[in-house]
Image (tube, rainbow, N blue to C red):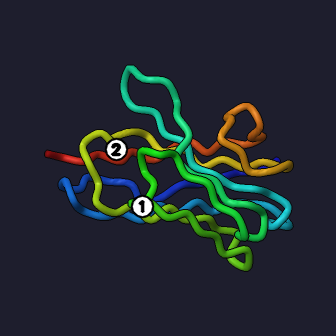
Amino acid sequence: QVQLVESGGGLVQTGGSLRLSCAASVRTFSNYAMGWFRQAPGKDREFVAAISKFGGSTTYADSVKGRFTISRENAKNTVYLQMSSLKPEDTAVYYCVAATSVSSVAPGLYDYWGQGTQVTVSS
């Protein structure tokens, strides 16, 4: 069973930055493609970013492209989401996800989900 634990969320002003981390309790982290989704109050869960098993490929939602960066450290079993130029519309619970197949924008392809971390951007 894979456990994903997110950290780094919090309250930040518009234009500020945050870095989310997700630690995975797995034997071989590089067996998993990783990603981030988010869900704002009253809205559907949406894709944010994904990274392939060895970090060679990344994908971003149009809404965060150029502002967010996903990365991973396989030696530390950790994936990161660096968020910059934050906007109030980025306010949401952010979920770390892991897939044994390939990285994808589709939530259904991810096998494991973390509990989420709240990010709030004040205007």
Disc 1 versus disc 2: nearer the observer = 1
Residue visible at 54% across and 65% down in the picture: 80
Q: Quadrant of the C terminus?
A: top left
Residue visible at 85% across and 67% down in the picture: 28
37 lies left or right of 23:
left
Name the residue beneath numbered marker 2: 90
11 vs 43, nearest the viewer: 43
Gap between marks 1 and 2 measured at Cα: 14 Å
Residue 58 in the image, given as x and y percentages of width and height: 64, 60
Q: Look at the numbered disc 1 and give the secondary structure of its residue.
A: loop
96 vs 59, nearest the viewer: 59
Pointers 1 and 2 in contact (CB under 8 A)?
no
Residue 106 in the image, given as x and y percentages of width and height: 68, 35
Residue 117 in the image, given as x and y percentages of width and height: 45, 47
118 lies left or right of 70:
left
Quick one: label 1, few (<14), some, or many (20+) residues within 10 Å?
few
Dividing the picture into quadrants, the one containing residue 107 is: top right
Please give the label number shown on residue 107: none
Mark 1 residue type: Gly
Dividing the picture into quadrants, the one containing residue 120 is: top left
23 vs 82, nearest the viewer: 82
Please give the label number shown on residue 66: 1
Residue 14 in the image, given as x and y percentages of width and height: 19, 53
Quick one: label 2, few (<14), some, or many (20+) residues within 10 Å?
many
Q: Residue furthest bottom?
A: 75
